[in-house]
Each structure stands twice: as C-alpha cells, then as structure tokens.
Image: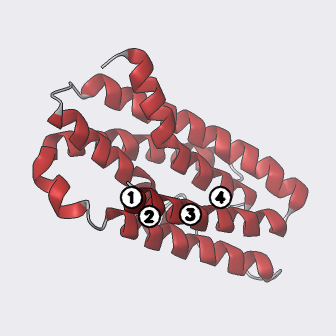
Amino acid sequence: MELATSFFIAVSLAMDAFAVSLGVGTAGLAKELRTKFRMAFHFGIFQALMTVVGWLAGSTVSNLIKGFDHWIALAILGAVGLNMVRSGLNPEKECYSTDPSRGKTLIMLCVATSLDALAVGMGMAMIHTPVLKPALMIGLVCLSLSGIGLFAGTKLGEKFGKRMEILGGVILIFIGIEIVASHLLA
C-alpha cells in the first residue's frame, strides 16, 4: 500500500477520534497535559491495534460483525453524547464523575471510534496487503489528530463554557448517526 494511500486512510479513520477528543476537550474534561496525552495515546493505540486485529481476522469475523458494528458505535457514542448534553444543560451537573481518560469510559470511546479500523484491517487482509506500516501510520495520525482535538476543544471550552459541552455531545451523537447512515446506505 502506498504511503499517500495509507495517510489518507489514516486521516479518514482518525476523524471520529478527533471529534470525540474535541468534545471531551470542550467539556473541560481533559485539562491536564497528562490526561490529554493518555487519551490521544489510547485512541492511537486502539486504531492501530484494531487495524491489525481486523487484518488477522480477515474475512472470517467480518461477516459476523458487519451487520451490527455500526449500531454498537451509535449506542456508545450516543450514550456518551447524551450524557454530555444533559450535563451541559444543567449548570451544576458534571458530565462524568470520573476522568474520561481512564477506565471503562476510555475503553468505550476507544472501541467506538476504532470499529472502522477493524473493517479496514479486514479489507487489507482480503486484498493481501501487509498491515504493519499502514497500522503504524493509522495509529500515529490518530494520536496526533486526537491531541489536536483535545487542545483545541479545551480552548473552545474555556471560551464558551457549558455551551461547548452541549455541542460536543451533539457532535458525538451525529458521529454515531453518520456511522449508521454510512453503513445502511453503502
């Protein structure tokens, strides 16, 4: 696979993680540098690993999950997004009682944003393309764009406050809807 092709695939796959990072940043949930790095790092690792797992699974698992993977992504992103909107509408309520860059919430966000990478890895296996270099590119681009999203979101959140938390939640919900729509219309 050519370098340019790998890069454009990586950017496409990283858009969900970028948008989630932007939403988390606007909600003021990732203020510390360590938190931002942890989230971006995990998004990058999940994107890269899901690409490799997809490649390893090849066409066997593809048929088992392709019928509902988009619904899983919608459910996870929708739940997180609704929580953010609810929090944004209530000035005293915080979106999360715990750090979203740790534990179950982080894992849910990483899985929801990397399901497409699993499918890309499966596609790569079907056309007999080596996976390691593209997976590395996918992981690094996702890490970079997630970091940019977290920093930009934090600045927006500081400037616009709770309104950005609502917007971040709405963005997550629309990403989930877009994932379902793209699968249903494909």
Sequence-wise first label, 3 or 2: 3
Mark 2 is on which residue type? Val
Per the model, the C-alpha gap separating discs 3 and 2 is: 24 Å
Q: Are marks 1 and 4 in contact (CB under 8 Å)?
A: no
Whether residue 96 is situated above or below residue 14 in the rendered picture: below
Per the model, the C-alpha gap separating discs 3 and 4 is: 8 Å
Number of the label disc, if any, that sits on residue 183: 1
Percent x, y of residue 61: 15, 55
Between marks 4 and 2 in the image, the one whose residue lies nearer the viewer: 2
Whether residue 12 is situated above or below residue 167 in the rendered picture: above
**Residue indicated by mark 2:** 180
Q: Determine the secondary structure under disc 1.
A: helix
Q: Which residue does the image show at 26% across and 26% down from the upper left?
A: 132
Between marks 1 and 4 in the image, the one whose residue lies nearer the viewer: 1
Number of the label disc, if any, that sits on residue 100: 3
Q: Are marks 3 and 4 in contact (CB under 8 Å)?
A: yes
Number of the label disc, if any, that sits on residue 24: 4
Outermost left residue: 60
Between marks 3 and 2 in the image, the one whose residue lies nearer the viewer: 2
Percent x, y of residue 45: 39, 42
